[in-house]
Image (cartoon, rainbow, N blue to C red):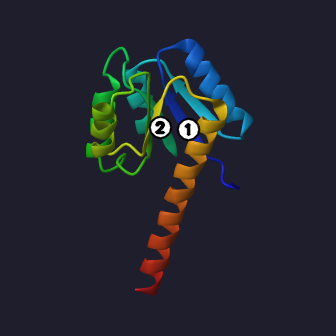
Amino acid sequence: MTKKYTVLVIEDDVEILHFISRALELEGFTVYRAEDGATGLEIVRKDSISLVLLDLRLPGPDGWSILREMKRDPGLAAIPVVVLTAAAEASQRRRTLRMGAASYLIKPISAHELVQTVRDILKRKAGAAGARKAVSSTA
């Protein structure tokens, strides 16, 4: 990946936030951090964010509310959201994916799995954007 991607991590557990941030920074990503939902929404609205890693249980607006709000906002809806949670229920996973999450990761997660998931989603997003550009230039 040659483009510099910016990832926003919205996570209230400071140790997990540090772990995720460090793993992504070591791979060359620019990382923004938010420890609550309100701060996360503020950052995603004002900065150019490539992808959001979102915990579901947060102080302030929870992850469900943030995901819902992002997918309803035309300016934010295209930003991929990866849900991070300790809850492994299949129904919760299906619900987040139906709401528009790009992926659902269960904590604890390895740095390798995290980075690979982020890279895969950003590659798919870049590929889709490239395909749209090619179609619009030939039309």
Q: Position of residue 109 (x, y in %)?
A: 57, 28
Say which residue label 1 marks. Answer: 7
Mark 2: which secondary structure?
Answer: strand
**Label number found at residue 75:** none
Give the distance between the C-alpha atoms of the residues marked 2 and 1, in whole angstroms. Answer: 6 Å
Crowding at label 2, few (<14), some or many (≥20) Cα neighbours within 10 Å? many
Crowding at label 1, few (<14), some or many (≥20) Cα neighbours within 10 Å? many
122 vs 33: above or below: below
User: Which quarter of the figure has residue 103?
Assistant: top left
Residue pictured at 52% horizontal, 58% vertical: 124
Mark 2 and 1 residues: CB-CB less than 8 Å, in contact?
Answer: yes
The residue lying toward the viewer, choosing from 45 and 30, is 30
Left or right relative to 96: residue 112? right
Q: Amino acid at mark 2?
A: Val
Residue pictured at 49% horizontal, 57% vertical: 125
Residue pictured at 33% horizontal, 43% vertical: 97
Say which residue label 2 marks. Answer: 52
Mark 1: which secondary structure?
Answer: strand
108 vs 118: above or below: above
Q: Earlier in the sequence, mark 2 or mark 1?
A: 1
Q: Position of residue 80 (x, y in %)?
A: 44, 46
Q: How many marks?
A: 2
User: Which quarter of the figure has residue 57?
Assistant: top left
The N terminus sits in image quarter: bottom right
Q: Position of residue 55 (x, y in %)?
A: 43, 25
Q: Is residue 47 visible?
A: no
Q: Residue furthest bottom?
A: 138
Q: Is residue 119 visible?
A: yes
Residue pictured at 30% horizontal, 29% vertical: 64
125 vs 100: above or below: below
Q: Amino acid at mark 1?
A: Val
